[in-house]
Image (cartoon, rainbow, N blue to C red):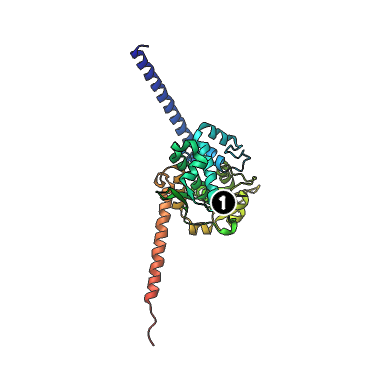
Amino acid sequence: MPRGHKSKLRAREKKRQAQNETKALEDAQATAANHPSQNLPTMGTEDSPLSFQGAAAAAFTDAHGDGEGNPSSPQASKSLSKDPLTKKVVLLVRFLMEKYQTREPVTKADMVNSVVKSYKNHFPKILKRASALLELAFGVDLKEVDPIRHCYAFINKLDFSVDERILHEDSMPQTGFLMMVLSVIFLKDNCASEEEVWEMLNMMGIYADKTHCIYGHPKKALTQDFVQLKYLEYRQVANSDPPRYEFLWGPRAHAEVTKMKALEFLATISDTTPSDLSPWYEEALREEEERLQARLAAKGSKQGKSRRKPCPK
């Protein structure tokens, strides 16, 4: 084929692709304009293609998998089939969960020999994606503490720990689960309907009527355990008939968690920065300033009292 003809074909193909991309962008913008409430942070990125619908469900489903990382969820299976590395990511997450629960040390050699195997050249990417899922689900980060022997340790990235009264001795921390719910409440103007919360959790493979292999009984955790511990407020929507319910932050969440911390959690999931999540970022900044002023006022009051010494008799 003449060189000039090939150049024309390539030019036509590029033009067609550009037109398709432009149309897709216009469609997305139109959808966002028509449904502003849906214009929320996305939970999957090119570098971490394990979306809520696929990876999280694959890694944490209580599904009746075959034990080799093949969950029964159609969405999870679809995600696994699209990316050959995804199966390794899911298996590595499960491997790390076992290590956390048994308090065993973790080394690169363990992960490569037990899970990654022939994909060892892709180990950095597999580990990065698995670590992102651990943080998403449990608020736990995996950090290399010995770069010479390549030893890793689990670190709680959140500033608070869920009351141990609702945890078993060998269970994974529930902070990530709670932070997901608190974040959704924050995004929904600090009050999320029960339907909105479960819509998000369903995308994670977590269902109200199903026992979860990691979170146990999710509905009980949300409507009873976290409520009793003052992390969540669960109340009936005023004048709703039939009764409908909604979630708000409880007093303990307000005391131990900040809106900025919830936003940082969302930013990590979305592979972005808190400042990109407007207008929630501005609201979180206002709260940070209010907290700072309250601390300064309390400190000033305390110092004032300490200066007031009783007069000698």
Q: Which image quadrant is residue 225 in?
A: bottom right
Toward the viewer: 157 or 269? 157
Residue drawn at (41%, 56%), measured in percent from left and top? 288
Toward the viewer: 49 or 8? 49
Toward the viewer: 273 or 237? 273
98 sits to left or right of 293: right
Q: Which image quadrant is residue 287 in?
A: bottom left
What number of labels is visible? Answer: 1
Do we see residue 34 in this rendering?
no
Residue drawn at (45%, 29%), measured in percent from left and top? 24
Q: What is the three-letter code of the residue carrying label 1?
A: Phe
Instruction: Report the residue marked by disc 1.
Output: 247
- Residue 206 place in picture, x, y as percent: 59, 44
Q: Is the C terminus in the top left, top right, bottom left or bottom right quadrant?
A: bottom left
278 sits to left or right of 204: left
Toward the viewer: 168 or 198? 168
| Residue at the bottom extreme, as displayed | 313
Do we see residue 153 in this rendering?
yes
93 sits to left or right of 278: right
Q: Secondary structure at mark 1?
A: strand
In this view, 255 is above or below 282: below
- Residue 268 place in picture, x, y as percent: 45, 45
- Residue 183 place in picture, x, y as percent: 50, 49
| Residue at the left extreme, as displayed | 4
Residue drawn at (60%, 37%), measured in percent from left and top? 73
How would you rate the neighbour count of disc 1 (Cα within 10 Å): few for under 14, some for 14-19, many for 20 or more?
many
- Residue 290 place in picture, x, y as percent: 41, 58
Q: Is the N terminus in the top left, top right, bottom left or bottom right quadrant?
A: top left
